[in-house]
Image (cartoon, grey):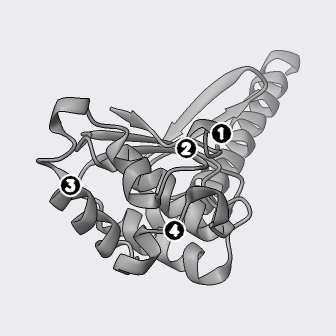
């Protein structure tokens, strides 16, 4: 399991992008797995020149991809993402959407971005009034199903009241 950080840790600001990813590995494995970090970053659209940039100089979209690479270098089965689309430019947003659609592992995504949720999820947990509701549906369809469930419950209560007063 890996949690995708929301912000770059200050400790990695002076590190190159490549070294920031390698820092997630045990010291003894960093050199032998350098190729893996380079391949991972290249797959995220970074050039060798980009990988040499210090983390502090990256754009918001580059930060997001770097944070994801730091989580992925350990090959997790489960990714935890908390509001990953915040502050992203459109190209990075589209990249994130495509990445999650093609990710072979599982992920838990917490977001207010309904468009992203609809594009990448097939199950939704909705927390409302201290109750957690699960639907095996994307976000918008799950919200509609919750409204329908509420309406069915209201209709059942009205029928029950009519029977008890009749």
Q: Is 89 drawn above or below residue 28 in the view shown?
A: below
Q: Mark 2, residues whose alpha carbon is within 10 Å: few (<14), some, or many (≥20)?
A: some
Tag 1's secondary structure? Answer: helix
Quarter of the image holding residue 60?
bottom right
Residue denoted by label 2: 12
For label 3, the crowd category at 10 Å Cα-Cα, with few meaning under 14, some 14 to 19 and many 20 or more, is some
Spot the residue most to the right.
Answer: 165
Gap in angstroms between the C-alphas marked 1 and 3: 22 Å
* Mark 4 neighbour class, 10 Å CA radius: few under 14, some 14 to 19, many 20 or more: some
Left or right of residue 10: residue 49 = left
The residue tagged with tag 2: helix, strand or loop?
helix
Mark yes or no: residue 120 visible: yes
Q: Do the residues labelled 1 and 2 touch (CB within 8 Å)?
A: yes
Give the mark, 4 or 2, whose residue is nearer the N terminus: 2
The numbered mark at residue 10 is 1
Relative to 9, does residue 105 appear above or below in the rendering? below
Determine the residue positioned at 17% across, 47% down: 31
The N terminus appears in which quarter of the rendering? Answer: top left
Residue at the extreme left: 32
Number of marks: 4
Vertical order, 104 against 24 (above or below): below
Q: Distance between the residues labelled 3 and 2?
A: 17 Å
Of 5 and 77, nearer the camera is: 5
Query: Which residue bears the numbered disc 4?
Result: 53
């Amino acid at each position: 399991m890996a949690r995708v950080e929301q912000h770059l840790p200050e400790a990695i600001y002076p590190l190159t992008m490549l070294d920031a990813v390698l820092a997630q590995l045990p010291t003894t494995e960093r050199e032998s797995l350098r190729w893996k970090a380079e391949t991972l970053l290249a797959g995220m659209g970074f050039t060798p020149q980009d990988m040499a940039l210090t983390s502090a100089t990256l754009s918001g979209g580059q930060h997001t991809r770097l944070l994801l690479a730091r989580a992925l270098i350990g090959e997790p089965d489960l990714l935890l993402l908390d509001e990953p689309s915040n502050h992203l430019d459109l190209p990075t947003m589209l990249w994130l959407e495509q990445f999650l659609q093609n990710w072979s592992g599982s992920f838990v995504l917490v977001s207010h971005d309904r468009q992203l949720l609809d594009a990448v999820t097939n199950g939704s947990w909705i927390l409302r009034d201290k109750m957690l509701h699960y639907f095996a549906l994307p976000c918008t369809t799950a919200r509609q199903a919750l409204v329908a469930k509420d309406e069915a419950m209201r209709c059942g209560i009205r029928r029950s009241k009519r029977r008890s007063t009749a």
